[in-house]
Image: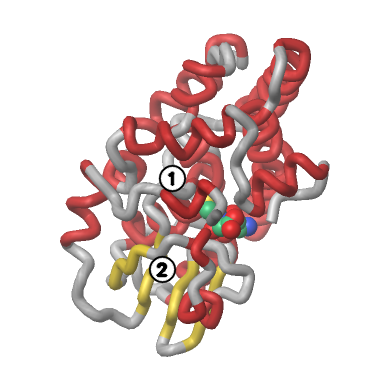
């Protein structure tokens, strides 16, 4: 029998579906996307923020179909086909858009070298601390493990929020740092409902920041109907997911 993750709902819904419908025609960038995936949403938010033309193509990465493995040998969404060549890794893709489309405004990385390096440090922190802690909380079984995972997540988010200038990470300008964390903020409802997560326990600054991220049009417009995420996350909540990310968390390895 195929692993359960293969049976995910096949396409975007709600606001995200409206966006998909506006991006069907061929463009220089083909965006191979999984509507449900937080890493994928990073690339999607960046495309939208920068107003870069793209053709949206939905792919179920769990099926590991040959045509998709030729685009991303890791078999993960998101991926871009750019002028017939393939690129992948969400953070690489968001940086690539900065480099390949310099005339598209706004830029999402600071032009000041120090601020840019600082932004990279905090993107790295999100990757190594916030996202794995979020994923561990999602999959933790039993009160003791869930309590420990929740505290670990609160601590990471608190540390991050201390760095937020407001309203966005680097101040008035929305940046790649905000994009790096936004999809996990958008999905906080899952851990709130099922893992007793309370953003108020992180810090006042964090709650304010979350409000700004959740009202950003690019975040809203790349999100599907909330109930469609539930069956996907149910597998993680029961610790039954067979994705590469789930296997990595179980084995204590870094996320793929
Ligand atoms: N490091 C990758 C990135 O940032 O793009 C992670 C991407 C990733 O894990 N994507 C998931 C995927 O394609 C969906 S959310 N999973 C397929 C699998 O686990 O087999």
Q: Nearer the viewer, residue 131 or 210?
A: 131
Q: Is residue 189 left or right of residue 180?
A: left
In this rendering, is residue 17 above or below 86? above
Residue at 30% x, 54% y is 11
The C terminus lies in which quarter of the figure? Answer: bottom right
Residue lying at the far right in this picture: please name it: 252
Q: Mark 2 falls on what kind of element?
A: strand
x and y percentages locating residue 48 in the rendered image: 32, 57
Task: Name the residue tied to disc 2.
Answer: 32
Q: Is residue 72 left or right of residue 28?
A: right
Alpha carbon distance from label 1 to label 2: 24 Å
Q: Is residue 225 left or right of residue 246?
A: left
x and y percentages locating residue 9 in the rendered image: 35, 48
Residue at 58% x, 64% y is 89
On the rendering, which quadrant does ligand 1 occupy?
bottom right
In this rendering, is residue 130 above or below 58? above
Task: Name the residue tied to disc 1.
Answer: 174
Q: Is residue 23 left or right of residue 147?
A: left
Q: Is the CB atom of the residue marked by disc 1 within 8 angstroms of ligand 1's nearest atom?
A: no
x and y percentages locating residue 127 in the rendered image: 67, 46
Dot 2 alpha-carbon crowd within 10 angstroms: few under 14, some 14 to 19, many 20 or more: many
Q: Mark 1 falls on what kind of element?
A: loop
Residue at 36% x, 75% y is 30
Residue lying at the far bottom in this picture: please name it: 84
Q: Nearer the viewer, residue 140 or 177?
A: 140
Q: How is the image coloured?
A: secondary structure
Asked if disc 1 and disc 2 are in contact, CB closer than 8 Å, the reply is: no
């Amino acid at each position: 029998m195929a692993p359960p993750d293969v049976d995910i709902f096949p396409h975007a819904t709600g606001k995200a579906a409206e966006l998909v419908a506006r991006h069907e025609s061929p463009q220089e960038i083909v965006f191979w996307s999984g509507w449900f995936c937080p890493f994928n949403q990073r690339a999607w938010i960046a495309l939208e923020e920068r107003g870069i033309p793209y053709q949206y193509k939905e792919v179920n990465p769990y099926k590991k179909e040959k045509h998709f493995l030729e685009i991303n040998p890791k078999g993960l969404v998101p991926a871009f086909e750019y002028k017939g060549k393939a690129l992948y890794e969400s953070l690489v893709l968001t940086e690539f858009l900065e480099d390949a489309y310099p005339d598209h405004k706004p830029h999402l990385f600071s032009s000041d070298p120090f601020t840019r390096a600082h932004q990279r440090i905090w993107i790295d922190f999100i990757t190594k601390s916030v996202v794995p802690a979020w994923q561990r909380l999602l999959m933790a079984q039993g009160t003791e493990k869930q309590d420990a995972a929740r505290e670990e997540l609160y601590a990471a988010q608190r540390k991050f929020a201390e760095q937020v200038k407001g309203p966005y990470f680097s101040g008035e300008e929305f940046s790649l740092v905000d994009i790096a964390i936004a999809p996990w903020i958008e999905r906080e409802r899952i851990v709130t409902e099922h893992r007793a997560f309370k953003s108020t326990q992180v810090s006042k600054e964090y709650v304010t920041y979350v409000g700004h991220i959740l009202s950003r049009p690019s975040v809203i417009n790349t999100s599907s109907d909330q109930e469609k995420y539930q069956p996907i996350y149910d597998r993680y909540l029961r610790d039954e997911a067979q994705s590469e990310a789930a296997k990595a968390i179980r084995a204590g390895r870094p996320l793929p």
